[in-house]
Image (cartoon, coloured by chain):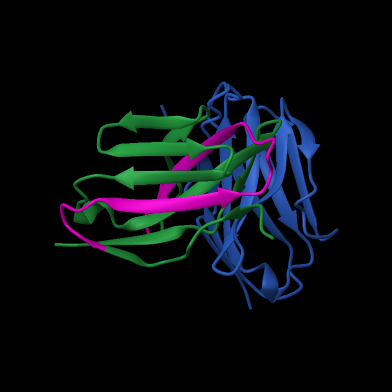
Chain colours: A blue, B green
Amino acid sequence: DAGVIQSPRHEVTEMGQEVTLRCKPISGHDYLFWYRQTMMRGLELLIYFNNNVPIDDSGMPEDRFSAKMPNASFSTLKIQPSEPRDSAVYFCASSLGARDNEQFFGPGTRLTVL
Amino acid sequence: QKEVEQNSGPLSVPEGAIASLNCTYSDRGSQSFFWYRQYSGKSPELIMFIYSNGDKEDGRFTAQLNKASQYVSLLIRDSQPSDSATYLCAVNTGFQKLVFGTGTRLLVSP
């Protein structure tokens, strides 16, 4: 089975531009998570969904960030407008939501905002 | 105080030695604990999880949990150069939400 799929793998953009990151979770997984990883702050949870419904978005840094999950097989994370401090690796992960809660991570999107 | 704390390392051990990785957490209500391994430039992958006090063994890996001390550790026996990676401790704070430590970098020298 395919794992979590993310696109693009690399994104370089200029400050002020809109950025859209995409994720396809593992089929049958009920939970989808968006994380951001930087050297300084490590891996931070931004938002997560259960059955396509946002459950906790307390990690979303500010109004410039938004996430949607229109169906069980697709989610987007949008940054508008982007800023240099948004440069990071963004991971999407999915899980079945069982007690052991194994989250399967996608390969990540490396975002560079110039 | 950070919710999950780890020594950033690097922790250097020779091949064949035991590597001991430690993690402390602040939320006493946390119920389950996870160790992920992340190779440079790759995504995290789960090694082990534990939710009962004591030890849990899986091959060369042993996770140890002490809820009274709010302490989780990971022991890697017979360390191999291929074990060189960053090890992330994660704590389930409820409702499927994981909080990750910043990770400990392990270097195993041949």
Residue reaching furthest right? A63
User: On the image, which quarter does residue A65 sit in?
Assistant: bottom right
User: On the image, which quarter does residue A12 sit in?
Assistant: bottom right
Image coordinates for residue A16, horizontal then vertical, percent: 76, 73
Residue reaching furthest bottom? A114
Which residue is at a point 43% across and 59% down the rendered structure image? B104
Q: Is residue A104 visible?
A: no
Image coordinates for residue B109, horizontal then vertical, percent: 19, 64
Q: Is residue B53 left or right of residue A70?
A: left
Q: Is residue A107 above or below residue B108?
A: above
Is residue A102 on the magenta stretch?
Answer: no
Q: Count how many numbered circles sit on residues in the image.
A: 0
Is residue B25 on the magenta stretch?
Answer: yes
Q: Is residue B70 visible?
A: yes
* Quadrant (top left, top right, bottom left, bottom right) of the N terminus of chain A: top left
User: On the image, which quarter does residue B31 sit in?
Assistant: top right
Q: Is residue B108 above or below residue B18?
A: below
* Residue closest to the eye, B2 or A69: B2
Q: Is residue A52 left or right of residue B92?
A: right
Which residue is at a point 72% across and 25% down the rendered structure image? A51
Image coordinates for residue B90, horizontal then vertical, percent: 55, 44
* Quadrant (top left, top right, bottom left, bottom right) of the C terminus of chain A: bottom right
Which residue is at a point 51% across and 27% down the rendered structure image? B52
* Residue closest to the eye, A108 or B49: B49
What is the span of residues highlighted in magenta in the rendered image?
A: B13-40
Image coordinates for residue B24, horizontal then vertical, percent: 56, 50
Which residue is at a point 68% across and 73% down the rendered structure image? A85
Residue reaching furthest front? B68
